[in-house]
Image: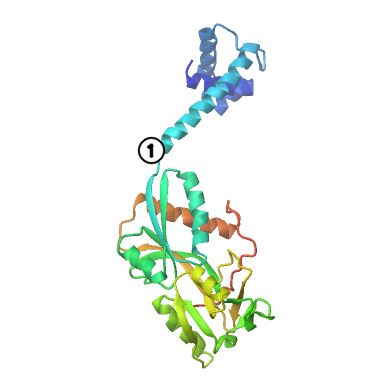
Amino acid sequence: MDLRSLHYFTVVAEELNITRAAERLNMSQPPLSSQIKGLEEELGVRLFIRGKRHLTITEAGSLLYRRARQLLELSEQTQQEIRSLEGLSGDLNISLVEGRAPYLLARWIAGFRSEYPQVAVHLWNGSGDEVIERVHRGLADLALLAAPYNAELLDGFSVGREPWVAMMSKDHPLAEGGGDLLPLKKLVGQPLFIPNRRSRAEAVRAWFAELGEEPRIAGDLSNYIDAVALAEQNAGVCIYPMTTYNENDLVVKKIITDSARQIEYALVWPRSAHLSELSEEFINFVRDCMEAERLGTQPYRMPEMEFLPPEDTRYL
């Protein structure tokens, strides 16, 4: 017995009709009948009782059918395992900023490694400027960062966005009332902590300038944990991307309005560099995920209450 003969036999056993089985196998009837006859001669038993219009499987045929299915499934599993050993593998280094970026990336990594289990992913978190520097120095294959970025040096595409919020202690006067929204003018005069990216302070000052005011910047920070800690201890108000996860009962977050701002996340890579097959495959995988999210067919669960600002919200 060989696997091909067993495959032919299982199709005939399922169809119980040589004509339909031959059509399913995309072959003509005579060689299929010859294969079944040769199998019966090899085993020394009748596998089918031939009728005028259909076949009836014998007891020996039923036993062979069960075993043949098991053997064929085992053969397919073995082939898949062997192919996976020769499939995509290697190390993928990704640098990323805080905020929503880790949660976006986690979805993609989970799906990507289910297809390519031999791939090892190495993550590094830092500020936007640090992430960009690592890409330029060749320490990261890809980066997930907050726009803007230099499009002359980096190629990439948008992968998500979220609003800017004011984070404060639950005991802060601005935390009381007003729901989940806070007009920008309410932050005038408040000690503010902002992300330490070089371009961010200038952008925040331009934002307050729309009101004819100057922000009172008390300091800067590099990650979400710092923002939560400063807000919790009532050191000031932190202006930070929304990042709706890892809620803290001691911290209140309010979406800044009048005028609102949003942040955009992008997956980027060096424009001049030759991308590895692994990097290109991951980029294509993320593009497919983005299209699946647009169509609502993504295989992963989207977080409940995920807030997206209106499309026409200005970027900061």
Q: Which residue is drawn at 38% across and 44% down?
A: 89
Name the quadrant containing residue 64.
top right
Q: In this view, does 177 lie to the left or right of 268?
A: right
Query: In front here: 289 or 306?
Result: 306
- Image location of residue 125, percent across then percent down: 43, 63
Q: In this view, does 96 lie to the left or right of 135?
A: right
User: Which residue, as the protein is rendered here, is positioned at the far bottom?
Assistant: 212
Colour scheme of the rendered structure = rainbow
Q: Is residue 227 above or below residue 71?
A: below
Closer-to-camera residue (271/113)? 113
Q: Residue at x 41, y 78 (%)?
A: 199
Does residue 243 sit above or below 179 in this rendering?
above
In the image as oriented, which residue stretches furthest toward the top? 44
Q: Is residue 165 visible?
A: no
Q: Foreground: 80 or 187? A: 187
The count of marks equals: 1
Instruction: Name the residue that disc number 1 marks.
Output: 86
- Disc 1 marks a residue whose amino acid type is Glu
**Residue 214 x %, y %:** 49, 90
Q: Is residue 220 depicted above or below 155 in this figure?
A: below
| Circle 1: element type | loop
Nearer to me, 138 or 71: 138
Residue positioned 45% across, 34% down in the render: 81
Q: Where is residue 120 in the image (x, y as percent from the top left)?
A: 41, 48
Q: In this view, does 48 lie above or below 220?
A: above
Q: Can residue 148 be seen in this view?
A: yes
Q: Where is residue 77 in the image (x, y as percent from the top left)?
A: 50, 31
